[in-house]
Image (cartoon, rainbow, N blue to C red):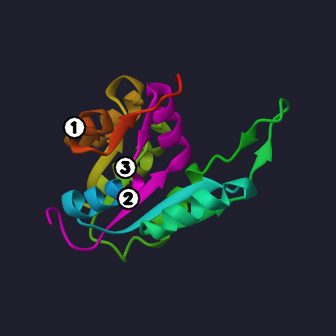
Amino acid sequence: MRGGRNNYAFIDEQNLYLGLKSLGWDMDYSRFRVHLAETYGVSRAFVFFGYVATNEGMYKRLRTCGYELIFKEVSRDHTGTVKGNVDVLLTLHALLRFREYEKAVLISSDGDFAPLVQYWVVQKKLRAVIAVQRRRCSYLLRKAAGGYLDYLESLDDEGLLEKTKRRP
């Protein structure tokens, strides 16, 4: 195991899901959890969601794979689209648990996390930021992460990702 024994992953699930969907990819979450442990030393992986009752089956599968789920109540915009923005919730949990972990791994492409990443860098707590793909990762997040940035698109040959039969 590289990169420590007690690292935590903080996963912005909507950002991850939308990024994978835009590429027409599905991810093997079980293999991804193993990858996080083996490559980044992740002992706990927190997934942040807007809670939707019809997704209970998916939530159960993720728990079985070793993820810890943290939910936010969702709202709907004027078109009825579910909004479950978890940026503040993820940041709050990362800061409240700050003394528990050696290093942090963020899975998101969202520039709103740049201040959190900058804080982790200053505190020598950042292990990695994992974005779905380079061209859709926020400039602010890329700048904050510096040399700690990895991309899921480069993991395609590790069996974590597969093309879906659906169109993106």
Q: Nearer the viewer, residue 68 or 167?
A: 167
* Amino acid type at image mark 1: Asp
> Looking at the image, is 16 positioned above or below residue 38?
above
User: Which residue sits furthest front?
Assistant: 165
Q: Earlier in the sequence, mark 3 or mark 2?
A: 2
Query: Residue at label 2?
Result: 30
| Quadrant the N terminus occupies | bottom left
Residue at image point 32% right, 34% down:
142
Residue 132 shown in magenta: no
Secondary structure beneath label 2: helix
Residue 157 numbered tag? 1
In the rendered image, residue 60, in percent from the top left (x then y), is placed at 57, 66
Of labels 3 and 1, earlier in sequence is 3
Image point (62%, 60%), residue name: 57
Q: Is residue 123 visible?
A: no
- Tag 2: residue type? Ser
C-alpha distance separating marks 1 and 2: 16 Å
Which tag is nearer the camera, tag 3 or tag 1? 1
Which of the 4 image quarters holds residue 104?
Answer: bottom left
Inspect the image, locate mark 3, and give the three-letter code of the amino acid beneath it: Val
- Toward the viewer: 99 or 16? 16
Residue 74: give x, y in percent of width and height.
Answer: 74, 51
Crowding around mark 3 (Cα neighbors within 10 Å: few <14, some 14 to 19, many 20+) is many
Could you give the CA–CA distance between mark 3 and mark 1, rounded to whole angstroms?
27 Å
Q: Which residue is mark 3?
A: 117
Q: Which is nearer the eye, 14 or 120? A: 14
Please provide the residue range marked out in magenta.
1-30
Note whether residue 40 is visible.
Answer: yes
**Please, which residue is most extreme toward the left here?**
2
Check disc 2: other Cα within 10 Å, few if <14, some if 14-19, many if 20+: some
Q: Residue furthest right?
A: 78
